[in-house]
Amino acid sequence: MDKLSFANLRLHLLVLLVTSFGCSSIAWAGGDEQDFATSVSFSVSKRFFKRLNVGLSESVSMRNNSTELDKFYTKADVSYNVVKGLLRVGADYYLIGAANKKDDIYLNHRYAGYLRVKKDVGRLSFGLKSKYQITYRPEKQQHKQYKDVWRNKLYVSTKIPKTHLYPCVGVESFIRTNSYKGTCLTKMRYEGGAKYNFNKHNSLKALFRYDDGMNVSRPKDVFSVALSYSITL
């Protein structure tokens, strides 16, 4: 099999995975409450000393079939490339404006640490990101103010030959570690999409996501579209 045929085969497999996620999400929706959400974000990042990366981003998300404000937040991120092209560790801080059903806005704080392992095999890039986050929500009752979640994401991406387009698929688990039920899986996220590099400094990414809620009092299945524009200085 020549290189071009092999590249086409990998692309077809990737498209098949994206289609499978979409079909599975419809089948899994079941009788849970459902919603369609959207989000947009803008981020700027800069590399220092070749291995240190610092970033800042702004995001807004909508809920209730994208008719109501859900959250807006500012995120600061610092990461370090421990092993070039393989292992990166980092920390995030989020200042979150969360809206309730009465459109009251509450300021929440989220702190997170993560590690990411990435391996390139030909045009394919495989990755695992493990992240632990703690969200402080002062508007909640005292025993509910802290929400601790352990997130683990597997993803694969590739590059379409002779283009600047990078399709990707991923699956992520959300494990609540301080729930009244104890440690339990509360959500699975499935996503597929693509990133387009305009040049080495500017890119646009579009993702379709399906969040399957579980093990909570009111599980919700959320379909969403996320757009993000990134600038690398």
Image (cartoon, grey):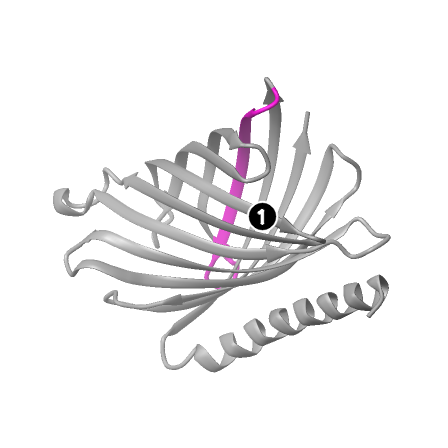
**x, y percentage for residue 129?**
46, 47
Rendered view: 59 above or below 46: below
Q: Please give the name of the residue rendered at 51% of the width and 77% of the height, measured from the top-left corner.
A: 24
**x, y percentage for residue 179?**
19, 55
Q: Quadrant of residue 19?
A: bottom right
- In the image, taking residue 18 as reference, residue 128 lies left or right, namely left
Q: Please give the name of the residue rendered at 32% of the width and 49% of the height, measured from the top-left corner.
A: 150
Give the overall secondary structure of the magenta segment.
strand
Q: Which span is picked out in magenta?
A: 50-67
The one nearer the camera, 91 or 58, is 91
Mark 1 — residue? 119
Decide: few, some or many residues near mark 1? Use Cα within 10 Å; few <14, some 14-19, many ≥20: some
- In the image, taking residue 68 as reference, residue 106 lies left or right, namely left
Q: Amino acid at mark 1?
A: Lys
As helix, strand or loop, the secondary structure at mark 1 comes to strand
Residue that lies at the very extreme toward the front in this rendered image = 1
The one nearer the camera, 212 or 113, is 113
Look at the image and say whether residue 103 sits in the magenta stretch: no
**x, y percentage for residue 221?**
42, 69
